[in-house]
Amino acid sequence: MPKVVIVTGPPGSGKTTITNSLAEKVKKGAVINVDDIRHIIKAGYVQPWLNVREAKEQKKLAILNACNLAINFLKSGIDIFIDDVVVSEDSVKLYKKLFAGNKIHFFLLLPSKDVLIKRDISRDEDTMGERAIELYDIFKAAKNKLDWYIIDNTFLTIKETTDKIMAKI
């Protein structure tokens, strides 16, 4: 049975790099970046962190579309690696509901705050600045409350982080 792996963490934690590395390690692997799905909306796009109804609806819609796309890949025997900022229990529950019948592996990448800030600053155009720090604090507070495997990748290479996840799935 194909795997479903969701990699989460604050901006700069390595989600995109690691999901791509994981997808390259398996026989058949695909990456779904939920931010890319969110950004399909051009007119009326709402930043996902805003505490407004439309932002919540768009977050839910992005997860729904990511899961529908993933299910099509799973039916073709392709392992799925999802890159998403999953900070709420509601989002975890929605993923589990939409992937009913499939085992889901959740991984939280949480390097030190200093390393996260350095990584965020080094990103070309996707720098999140204060939002990265806010999300770091949110993940740090929630790290033992949600159903995920936590990886402190402060001093791990891409290969070491990838290998650690591969060993768990």
Image: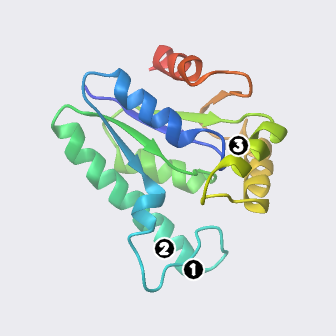
Q: Amino acid at mark 1?
A: Arg
Q: Position of residue 23 (x, y in %)?
A: 37, 31
Residue 68 shown left or right of residue 45 in the figure: left
Could you tell me if the residues under marks 1 and 3 are in contact, i.e. CB atoms within 8 Å?
no
- Kindly identify which residue carries mark 2: 57
Q: Are marks 2 and 1 in contact (CB under 8 Å)?
A: yes
Expressed as whole percent of the image width and height from the top left, the position of residue 123 reads 64, 50
- Mark 2 or mark 3, whichever is nearer to me: 3
Q: Which residue is mark 3?
A: 119
Q: Residue furthest right?
A: 114
Image coordinates of residue 42 in percent, x first then y, are: 42, 80
Dot 3 crowding, Cα within 10 Å, few <14, some 14–19, many 20+ = some
Q: Which residue has dot 1 on it?
A: 53
CA separation, marks 1 and 3?
31 Å
Image quadrant containing the C terminus: top left
Decide if residue 3 is on the left or right side of residue 57: left
For the residue marked with disc 2, what is the amino acid?
Glu
State how far apart marks 2 and 3 are (Cα): 30 Å
Q: Identify the residue at horizontal 67%, vertical 21% (top origin).
A: 156
Q: Secondary structure at mark 1?
A: helix
Q: Residue at x 79, y 61 (%)?
A: 130
Q: Tell me the distance, in whole angstroms, between the alpha carbons under discs 2 and 1.
A: 6 Å
Q: In the orientation shown, which residue stands out farthest toward the left?
A: 76
> Is 137 situated left or right of 104 in this image?
right
* Mark 3 residue element: helix
